[in-house]
Amino acid sequence: MLKINNLHVSVGDKPILKGLTLEVPAGEVHAVMGPNGAGKSTLGYALSGRPGYEATKGTASWNGDDLLALDPAERAAKGVFLSFQYPLEIPGVPAMTFIRTALNAQKRARGEEEVSAPAFLKLVRAASERLKMNFEMLKRPLNVGFSGGEKKRMEILQMALLEPSLLILDETDSGLDIDALRIVSEGVNALRSPERSMLVITHYQRLLDYIKPDRVHVLAAGRIVASGGPELALQLEAEGYDRYVSEAA
């Protein structure tokens, strides 16, 4: 279970999260929605350990481990994965080399046997077929020259191979057309399991038409101001965030 209690996070001298409290039980998918500047991406960065995002107060734990006390690599080894809103391009690093290096680094940290090159090749071929990715793309530098949809599929491919237990999806629908959104969502849904939790950060209901959440939370002014079932996302789509922003202020 992900447990966040009264979390305050600042970037530089600017406070962004201001007392956020949230719990995501094992096996559940929770959506976090809110207006621009509410702190949605900051929440993902703080949980994954991005430098510069300082937790000044409160706690955040995953399966009993204090996330805030771990460096990013240790959080990853514990099963935390952040899918970026805007995946970075890394020239000179082949995608398959990047993913296999990350996978084996996590296995070493967990005391597990590393994956051999032939076994990894078999895994990545199967995963790329499920995501309708051209296998030749994986021989290219990571995300270099990829379209927005291709970059997001690469993120989902990494999830499928790394098998994290906590997925944080930061506006995965950003920049996707309808076909790419459907394919990416199918890849995410294939990872749903009783042992895996997901935190889906989004502005729009359309992503939640494909990835059905168990709970929806409204983040405004740096904290959760409302929670409900999937119907809350439909209400937000129809009415907007103004009421929640006013109440938070």
Image (spheres, grey):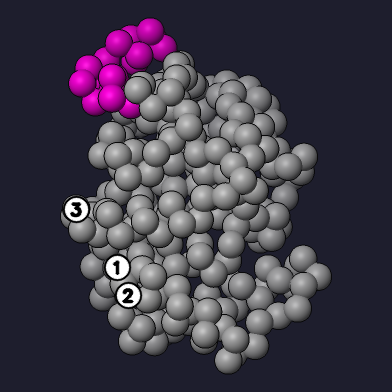
Residue 211 or residue 64, whichever sits in front: 211
Image height of 211 relative to 4, above or below: below
Highlighted range, magenta: 233-249
Residue 236 in magenta stretch: yes
- The quadrant of the rendering that contains the N terminus is top right
Q: Residue 168 shows which numbered tag?
A: none
Residue 220 at least partly seen: yes
Q: Residue furthest bottom?
A: 118
For label 2, the crowd category at 10 Å Cα-Cα, with few meaning under 14, some 14 to 19 and many 20 or more, is some
Residue kind at label 3, given as amino acid type: Ile
For label 3, the crowd category at 10 Å Cα-Cα, with few meaning under 14, some 14 to 19 and many 20 or more, is few
Q: Nearer the N terminus, badge 1 or badge 2?
A: 2
Residue kind at label 1, given as amino acid type: Glu
Is residue 162 toward the left or the right of residue 92 in the image? right
Q: Residue at x 47, y 28 (%)?
A: 215
Residue 168: image location, x then y, percent: 50, 47
**Which quarter of the figure has residue 143?**
bottom left
Report helix, strand or loop for mark 2. loop
Give the labeled residue for mark 2. 133
Give the labeled residue for mark 1. 150
Report helix, strand or loop for mark 3. helix
Give the labeled residue for mark 3. 178
Residue kind at label 2, given as amino acid type: Met
Q: Residue at x 73, y 42 (%)?
A: 63
